[in-house]
Image (cartoon, rainbow, N blue to C red):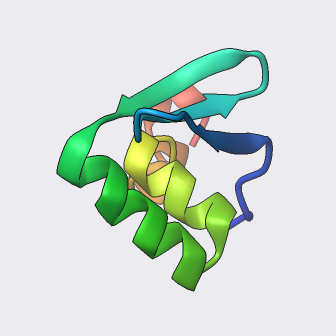
Amino acid sequence: MPRPQGFTYAVRGDGTVVITHGPRTAATLRGARAAEFVAEVDSGDAQLVMARWTGNYKRGNERAARRHPRNGG
């Protein structure tokens, strides 16, 4: 699986976490979810954690889609 790239996050003064992918906002986390995200991103690979929290990660169906007749397989 290729490593996700381009995610950044910022923690605002009120505790809100804004995750962006390139120029677009991918997710906004508040309260307990924001605190949980910050704890997790500090302990692991930040890009993978942000991809998982925003839903921008491979879902496991790429191999099956390759064999689909519409995709030439």
Q: Quadrant of the N terminus?
A: bottom right
In the image, residue 50 above or below residue 41: above
Is residue 25 left or right of 27 when viewed as pictured? right
- Specify whether 70 is left or right of 14: right
Q: Position of residue 29 (x, y in %)?
A: 35, 36
Say which quarter of the image contains residue 19.
Answer: top right
Task: Give the residue at the far left of this rendering.
Answer: 32
User: Which residue is at a point 46% across and 62% down the rendered structure image?
Assistant: 38
Residue 46 placement, left or right of 6: left
- Residue shown at 43%/72% (left/top)? 39
- Residue 55 visible in rendering: no
Quarter location, residue 15: top left
Q: In this view, does 69 lie above or below 15?
A: above
Is 48 above or below relative to 34?
A: below
Front residue of 1 and 28? 28
Closer to the camera in the image, 57 or 48: 48
Q: Where is residue 64 in the image (x, y as percent from the top left)?
A: 41, 53
